[in-house]
Amino acid sequence: MPRTYGDKLLLKLQGGDSTLLGVRLGRLCVEANLPISYVAPALEVSKNTVHLWFRGRVMNEQRRKVVEAFMHLVEQDMKDGVLPARSMKHAKTYIEGMIGKEI
């Protein structure tokens, strides 16, 4: 079962450098109620990698493009009222629909 975001991570994101893509991704995922355990397979990386990005680790250019595309879709669905996810089940269904496979 996916875990919610912990207080330490939320504080780190709040005070993080908003010029960093990973920090912006983290803030967006929190706002959209998408847990790391679902975001990681959508981005084809480990949960630990997503944690590191949220905390400011720089990502390579190849991953940047995937992350930017993911963020664009999530931002659009936030505007359209599809997100934030109402439950963990909704978040999982949303990500599975996005990537076209079960997670």
Image: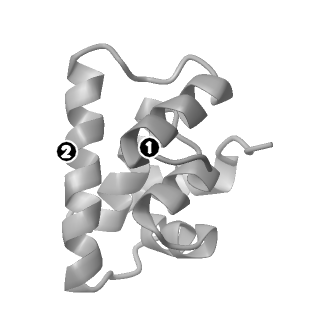
Label 2 neighbour load within 10 Å: few <14, some 14-19, many 20+? few
Residue at mark 1: 29
Three-letter amino acid code at the position of disc 1: Cys
Q: Position of residue 65 (x, y in %)?
A: 19, 69
Q: Is residue 22 left or right of residue 34?
A: left
Residue at mark 2: 72
User: Which residue is painted at 39% across and 22% down in the image?
Assistant: 83
Q: Earlier in the sequence, mark 1 or mark 2?
A: 1
Q: Position of residue 7 (x, y in %)?
A: 67, 47
Asked if one can make out residue 63 in the rendered structure from this viewpoint, the answer is yes
Q: Is residue 46 left or right of residue 57?
A: right
Splitting the image into 4 quarters, where does residue 72 fall? top left
User: Which residue is painted at 74% across and 45% down in the image?
Assistant: 3
Asked if one can make out residue 18 in the rendered structure from this viewpoint, the answer is no
Q: The N terminus lies in which quarter of the figure? A: top right
Q: Which residue lies most toward the right here?
A: 1
User: Which residue is painted at 23% across and 81% down in the image?
Assistant: 62
Q: Position of residue 92 (x, y in %)?
A: 59, 36
Label 1 neighbour load within 10 Å: few <14, some 14-19, many 20+? many
Element on which disc 2 rests: helix
Question: Which of the two residues, 80 or 16, is positioned nearer the viewer here?
Answer: 80
User: Which residue is painted at 38% across and 61% down in the image?
Assistant: 16
Three-letter amino acid code at the position of disc 2: His
